[in-house]
Image (tube, helix red, strand yellow):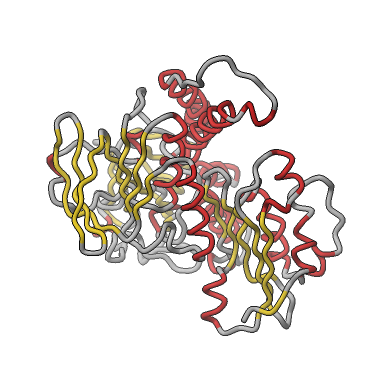
Amino acid sequence: MQKYDSIVIGTGQSGPSLARRLVGAGQSVAVVERGFFGGTCVNTGCTPTKTLVASAYAAHLARRAAEFGVTIAGPVTVDMKAIKARKEYVLGLSRNGVERSLKALKGCTVYEGHGRFTSPNSVEVGDQILEADRIFINVGGRALVPPIAGLDQVEYLTNSTMLELDHLPPHLVILGGSYIGLEFSQIYRRFGSEVTVIELAPRLIAREDEDVSLTVADILRGEGIDVRVDTEVVDVARHGNGIAVDVVHDGAHSQIIGTHLLLAIGRRPNTDDLGLDRAGIAVDDRGFIKVDDELRTSASGVWAMGDCNGRGAFTHTSYNDFEIIAANILDQGNRRVSDRIAAYALYTDPPLGRVGATEAEVRRSGKPALIATLTMENVGRAFEKGETLGFMKILVDKESRKFLGASFLGLSGDELVHSVLDLMYAGAPCSVLQKAVHIHPTVSEFIPVLIGNLKELH
């Protein structure tokens, strides 16, 4: 048995950072990793997909070259092997960087293998037993495979295996019209695939406001993506070298024939083979580890960070989990998950930046509020760049004049959202931002304009 001060299981966004802080505080730390270092973000999430988004944008812009007075001889084509190689190079730098840094960290011992609890303060890795007073779980999640008839008889792709393709799918059928599915839909349409998106809900990205959902659908359809909403998948089957997907819409049955099938309908935590029951660690009905506001599990001395705790499904929330735990354990802080303001982005082109409450949520609250919207075609910077799709929307509390939420669907929306997010954390009224003098020409210079156009939300 090897005794340590702390054990970190998993090397996603929060695990390595916490290991470094613990070692810096003089602790002996064991890090356990069963697969690739860096977790979902580095290997199958943000890093590789945003690299593909960049390649797809380059192809898209090249096809639009004539709009900017630029002539390209011949049709624009993509080299999928070169695109994959670039993706592997980018993610490899991050993955290898995480692995090297942990293995070179004095005071940290890395164990490569699958870790399972044998008690609340011990973990088995291969034929070794590691023991510590504090254990931190950072095991991430994976794609959810739905119980669809025939799915076990066909080949299908997930967000992970999709990244291994080095050829162009002639017709990609995507089950799921949410964030992961929509990003892949636009990526592969711009690479040259025919793409069909099937969503069970009445509209895409159903957690967003209706105007956002409908605009995103229009943008994707404008690029030739076949978007099917309010559509149920009944079963799937082999069809020659491809796949037949039987669907029902408005009571009518039809069939979609594709060459490749991507599942993008949700995520599940990697908690089903950790021996959590032997440690007395409670999970919910979906397998997510139950944690309190300081990320402590039901077992004393055990914390859960990142996607596996169900308190956030993003790299930035995982990193914030690390910050909360490190502050509370090492800095005598009092940081909590409930202090976090919801913020995220959808990386279609144009992107969607979201913060705080949606318009629908504000309406349901009954709270007196103000609202302002502005279409991107009225933003000079967007017009100059020829990227005028989308709109901006902000919501403000009528009495305090503090921001309640914002949706920025358009050029630089994923960066623009931070102007509002920062003021929300500061607890400052929107007048602070309205009086700010922003640089011209930028997209953000229109936020003060938006604030000046606030009207009552009826």
Q: Quadrant of the N terminus?
A: top left
Please determine whether, in this image, residue 180 is positioned above or below residue 425.
Answer: above
Q: Mark yes or no: residue 451 visible.
A: yes
Residue 428: percent from left, percent from top: 76, 69
Q: Quadrant of the C terminus?
A: bottom right
The residue that appears at 14% across and 42% down in the rendered structure is 237
Residue 61: percent from left, percent from top: 59, 30
The residue that appears at 22% across and 58% down in the rendered structure is 248
The residue that appears at 60% across and 60% down in the rendered structure is 407
Quadrant of the rendered structure where residue 174 is?
Answer: top left
**Residue in the foreground of this view, choosing between 451 and 404:** 451
Quadrant of the rendered structure where residue 88 is?
Answer: top left
Say left or right for 129 vs 183: left
Q: Mark yes or no: residue 103 visible.
A: no
Say left or right for 116 vs 133: left
Say left or right for 112 vs 364: left
Please determine whether, in this image, residue 318 is positioned above or below residue 284.
Answer: above
Total residue callouts = 0
**Residue in the foreground of this view, choosing between 106 and 38:** 38
**Residue in the foreground of this view, choosing between 47 and 179:** 179
**Residue in the foreground of this view, choosing between 442 and 158:** 442
The residue that appears at 76% across and 69% down in the rendered structure is 453
Residue 308: percent from left, percent from top: 38, 54
Please determine whether, in this image, residue 6 is positioned above or below residue 93.
Answer: below
Say left or right for 41 vs 370: left
Quick one: which residue is furthest to the top in this view?
73
